[in-house]
Image (cartoon, rainbow, N blue to C red):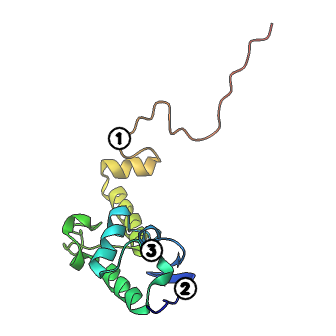
Amino acid sequence: MPERAFKEVIRLAGVDLVGFNVLHHELMKIKGIGPTLARVIPRVAGIPENLRTGFLTEKQVEKLERIIKNLNMHVPDFLVNRRKDREKGEDIHLIGSELKLRVERDIEFEKKIGTWRGLRHKLGLKVRGQRTRTTGRKGRTVGVRRKKK
């Protein structure tokens, strides 16, 4: 059995992945890929998920890259992060800086149209229904002073 070449760092989807770690752990370092997708992607590519990232061949890296770019074609709809996108109306999966920019644009849109979430974002308050009476306070802390005798 021939010995596979080991690479210490592999570049995948614009992120440097450490070769010593298991593939599904390294895939989670890509923004937009969580634990569930990190286990599904190697299965779709036909790569053992417990394989160390450094032992991937060039063909396997290219295959992973293709699958990650067109994830909505390879995984069920409930695993993509933008179902029925507002602009295109399609199920798409965004990763990396695309995801960050789209989320920022969504927040700006919510602020502009004046939804409840948009108003909470504008005011710098909690958005997802958390309590605000005691937590989430910003600014200077007010200490308690003892009464002078």
As measured in the structure, the alpha-carbon distance from the residue carrying label 2 to the one carrying label 1 is 46 Å
Residue drawn 36% across and 45% down? Answer: 128
Give whichever of discs 2 and 1 has the lower sequence position: 2
User: Do the CB atoms of the residues marked 3 and 2 lie less than 8 Å apart?
Assistant: no
Residue type pointed to by label 3: Ser
Residue 119 x, y percent position in the rendering:
37, 49
Residue holding disc 2: 7
* Residue 97 circle label: 3
- Please rate how many residues cluster around mark 1, counting C-alpha atoms within 10 Å: few if below 14, some from 14 to 19, many from 20: few
Residue type pointed to by label 2: Lys
Residue drawn 33% across and 82% down? Answer: 69
Q: Nearer the viewer, residue 99 or 69?
A: 69
Residue type pointed to by label 1: Gly
**Mark 3 or mark 2: which is in front?**
2
Under circle 2, the secondary element is loop
Counting the numbered discs, the total is 3
* Residue 39 circle label: none
Rendered view: 109 above or below 13:
above
As measured in the structure, the alpha-carbon distance from the residue carrying label 3 to the one carrying label 2 is 26 Å
Residue holding disc 1: 129
Q: Nearer the viewer, residue 120 or 7?
A: 7
Rendered view: 16 above or below 24:
below
Q: Residue furthest top?
A: 149
